[in-house]
Image (spheres, rainbow, N blue to C red):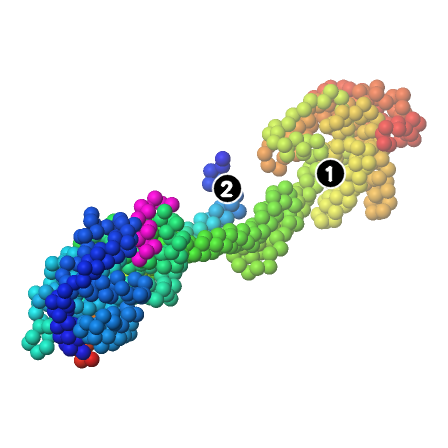
Amino acid sequence: MKSFANWSIRYKLLALLLLLGIMTFAATVTIAYLKNLRALKQNVMNQLTGIRRSKASENRGLLSDHPQPRFDSQ
Amino acid sequence: MFIDAMREFRTSCRKLDATPIPAEVPTAVLDDYRSHFYPEMQKLNLARPHVQDYLPFAPAALHLQYAYIVKNPYPPGQRREMESAGDGSDYSRVHSKYHRSLRRIVEKFGYSDLYLIDSRSGRILYNVNKSRDFGTSLREGPYRESNLAKVMRLCLASGNPDDVFFSDFERYEASWGEPTQWVASDVFDGHERLGILALQLSTHAIDDVATGGRGWQRDGLGLSGESNIFGPRYFLRTDVRPFLEDPEAFLAELKAEGAPEEKINRIRTYKTTILQMEARLPSVTAALEGKEGTVIERSPFGPGLSLVSFGPLNMEGLHWVIESRMNLDEALKPVSEMRRLFSWWGAALLLLTVMAALLMTRQILPPVNALVGAARKVAAGDLTAQVEWKWKDELGMLSDTFNSMTRSVREKTELIEQKNAENERLLLNILPGAIAERLKHGEQSIADGFAEVTVLFADVVGFTAFSAQTPAAELVSLLNDLFSRFDAVSQRHGIEKIKTIGDCYMAVCGLPKPRADHARAMTEMALDMLRVLGEFNRQRGTNLQIRIGLNSGPVVAGVIGSIKFIYDLWGDTVNLASRMESTGVPGAIQVSESVYRELCGAYKFEERGLIEVRGKGKLAAWLLREESVRTEAPAEVKA
């Protein structure tokens, strides 16, 4: 196999462009992917937590706003 | 209303306590328990050891259960429809007075039942549904350990009419072990405690909150998510979504998973999973410890993993856990979609990158390749090679520069070739072609011996006197004209002119390429020179004469010196040829013996006898008769 020094300028140029393109692309994609992954997971968890808290609040309301004490006036 | 009802029910119950019990009543009550209640409890695997363990023993309780349960014409689930037992008792009067209103309260606010409990005796004075605890005492009766009895004791201990107490869910045996939750509060008339009002909460209320009225998707829980509440012992306090969506499928799945039959029966009977299912999960444990968070764990009520948000739910003395969970695949569907999106876009962008790289390479390389091709052509000698590249970038500039360079090289090469041709021509004027070639090929010293050549010397007679009378320029012009004509003659005969020395003309035949007819060819040239001279004199109006001497023999020919060198001859043959000229006759050709012997048969010679030759002594010499020429002109000489 030829060493890089012996490659034709065509393949050197191609390799350089590909290397630069792929490295830039890979770095961008990796960062974007990780950030999106974290954000999406956080979003899903926040959504579930929000639902849970909402349900908990409703349950507390269900019991604390019980109409029973007001039966006295009827 | 509650105060009045409480007073009246309590009074009427006391009257019942004082009423004698007909003999058939205990038996009928026992029979009813044996035939209806107890078998059901056994079927649900909740039955106590003996049916008597459930039996009321207070007279009022026996009266009430006989009148409102045993004799109730409605089936167990609809006993509330009966407004009065019609037995003429005071209780029945009070019952008919308040039952409709109390039932309406239950129905209006969505409770399962309403109890009026005497705070002193703990007796259940009234309930809407006429369950098996009707008339019994929560202090001493069969249900004294129930969650209703517990909440009653909380009320009694508090003594604050504003306090409201909730029980946790428990199986309530009086309702066939159905999970029940109670809310209870004291009923006071001023400072007088009359009793306790207890309400059985409907499981639907808490289910409605947990399921959002079965609107899981609307709540953001998708197709698999649900919110559930668990108690301290990991048992459910809500119905699970699969059960609510398709109870039979859920029960079938439970059965397939090996759940006990009685558990399945209870769920089917009570139509709820509350208290029937437990989930010992890390998330529930953590929430019971007061922690809050999110975790991925196995799904307790379905396949696969779930993403769970958990936290404690502490309220009104209850320590529960609330969880919202979704199937992990569904919860992370946006993540999967993002992965798929990234994959597709990644592949597309990668392809675009490769294509862009190829395109750029193709755009940049053609001029480079064209330059390489043109440079190769130039290296191979084609100086007309040009690179056509119209772009004005660095490669375009390089192409232009290359084209300029090749043009310049081509012009310089043409100039050099032109100069070389001139030099060649000059060199060939000085040297024989073969000798010039040898010098060009690097030979430093050339000295070749030739065995047989004929040397000619010709000298203008009386040139010294002539030159004294003639201007130098004219003299040179005249001499140049004459010798140029001699040069033409020598070229015609294929004879090498060696040099001119003043008015002397020297030539040789037979070198550098040896030839056999050297003497004959030289003789022909000498004759032609005499003829050319005659013609010259006629044209110029002069009367010049020349002496010509010929001699044949071996010579050494070569080039000496490094500058202004000439091709010259050395040897005795040359000297004798010169002597033949110097001792010759003007306008005649004098030859040596060697020439005479070679040509005596072909030409006419006149013997001059012996002549004195400097350095040689006396030698024989002959004069060539011009009129004898061409008797046998050799063909090769002409050629």
Above or below — where is B91 with respect to B266? below
Q: How many marks?
A: 2
Q: Label 2 belongs to which residue?
A: A7
Q: Position of residue B529 (x, y in %)?
A: 82, 36
Parent chain of label 2: A
Does the CB distance between marks 2 and 1 fall below 8 Å?
A: no
Which of the two residues, B553 or B211, is positioned nearer the viewer here? B211
| Kind of residue indicated by mark 1 | Asp
- Residue B533: give x, y in percent of width and height: 83, 39
Please state, as top left, top right, bottom left or bottom right, where the C terminus of chain B lies in the image.
top right
Q: Amino acid at mark 2?
A: Trp
Q: Is residue B366 magenta?
A: no
- Using the numbered discs, state the Cα–Cα distance from disc 2 to disc 1 in whole angstroms: 73 Å
Residue B352 at what x, y percent from top left? 51, 55
Q: Which residue is more in the foreground, B510 or B34?
A: B34
Image mark for residue B503:
1
Q: Quadrant of residue B438?
A: top right
Q: Nearer the viewer, residue B511 or B239?
A: B239
**Magenta region, residue range:** B256-270
Q: Residue furthest left?
A: B191
The residue lying at 47 percent from left, 50 percent from top is: A18
User: Where is residue B301 shown, x and y percent of the image?
Assistant: 33, 52
